[in-house]
Amino acid sequence: MSTSPGGPGDPAERARTVACRVPAALCVRRLAPSRPLAQATTAAGQVLVLVPVGGEVDVALRREEELTAVLLVSDRAPVPLRDTLRAQLWLSGWLTPVRPADRRAAALAFAEVRPVAPLLDVGREAVLLRLDLAEAVLREGDRCAEVGPPAYAAARPDPLAGVEARMLQHLDRDHPEALALLRSSVPAGVLGPRDVVRPLGIDRFGYRLRIERPSGARDLRIPFPRPLTCAGQLPAATRQLLCAARAAPARRD
C-alpha cells in the first residue's frame, strides 16, 4: 500500500496525465488570466492551445512575435469530495501562433488526443497556438516536482486516463459493496472512528482512496498485483483486488 500523494511512476507520466484534464487557465504576462477554448498535449509532446479570434491573447500576439505564458491545468476528482483537487500542472514557456503551413497537421494532432468542436473554427473564430515549453511543474498534495521539456515530451499519459472518470463515478454511484471491500483493505490502525473513506482515483498502479478526517485528509493506494498496460485490463484487475479483500478475513482467522 502506498501513501504518497502521487504514488508510483514517473513524474513526467503523471504530468502528462494531468495535462489530459479539461479545466485550464492561460496566464500571459501583462494580460488578465483567461480560459482557453481548449488545450492539448499531442502524442509527440507538443503543447497546443486554442484561443478566440479577437481575444486579448490573439490581439497581443498580433503586436508581438511571442508571449511569455503559463498554462495551468487542474486535476479534480470526478466524484464528490470535501476537496476535489488532486493535482495541478504549470506549463511555462513561449506562446506563438502555429504557422499557416503547419496548421492542418497541428489541428489533426490536437484532434487525435482531444477532438473538440473549436478545432473546426481554426482560422475563422479560433486561433491555434503553440506553447514551447521551458518548464513543467507538477504539484500533488504538498509535493512539487519539476519535469524537463524533453522528459515531458517523451512521457505518455496513464493508460487509464481516458476511462478513469467514468469508472470512478460508476464505482461511487453503483457499487458501494465494492468500495466497502476496498475500504476493508486499509489497515485497521489507519482509520479512526469518524474517518470516511472515499474513492479518489484509478491509474495503472491501483485504486486511490481518500480518508476524510474531521481535521484533514490522507490519501493512499490499494495497488494492483502488477501495473496495467491498458484500460481493458481494469475489470479483471479489479475483480482480483476484490476477491483478495473478500478472502482476507478468512486468512486472518
Image (cartoon, rainbow, N blue to C red):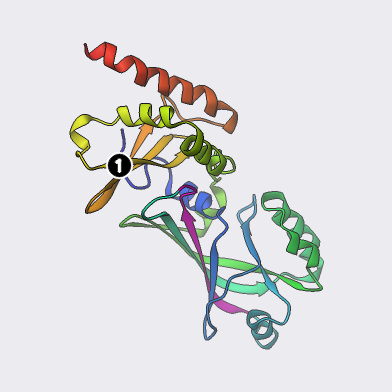
Residue at image location 42% in from the left, 55% down from the top: 87
Where is mark 1, residue-wise? 196
Q: Residues within 10 Å of mark 1 (few under 14, many from 20)?
A: some
Q: Is residue 245 left or right of residue 147?
A: left
Q: In the image, is residue 169 above or below residue 68?
A: above
Residue 238 shows in this picture:
yes
Q: Is residue 229 left or right of residue 108?
A: left
- Indicate the amino acid at tag 1: Val
Q: Secondary structure at mark 1?
A: strand
Does the segment drawn in magenta span residue 7?
Answer: no
The count of marks equals 1
Q: Residue furthest bottom?
A: 63
Residue at image location 48% in from the left, 35% down from the top: 171
Residue at image location 31% in from the left, 37% down from the top: 2
Position in image of residue 175 (x %, y %): 47, 31
Position in image of residue 144 (x %, y %): 35, 58
Residue at image location 48% in from the left, 55% down from the top: 75
Position in image of residue 151 (x %, y %): 50, 52
Classify residue 47 by image quadrant: bottom right
Does the segment drawn in magenta span residue 67?
Answer: yes
Position in image of residue 16 (x %, y %): 53, 51
Q: Quadrant of the C terminus?
A: top left
Q: Quadrant of the N terminus?
A: top left
Residue stretch rendered in magenta on the structure: 66-79
Q: In the image, is residue 59 above or below residue 80?
A: below
Q: Is residue 175 left or right of residue 215?
A: right
Q: Is residue 130 left or right of residue 187?
A: right
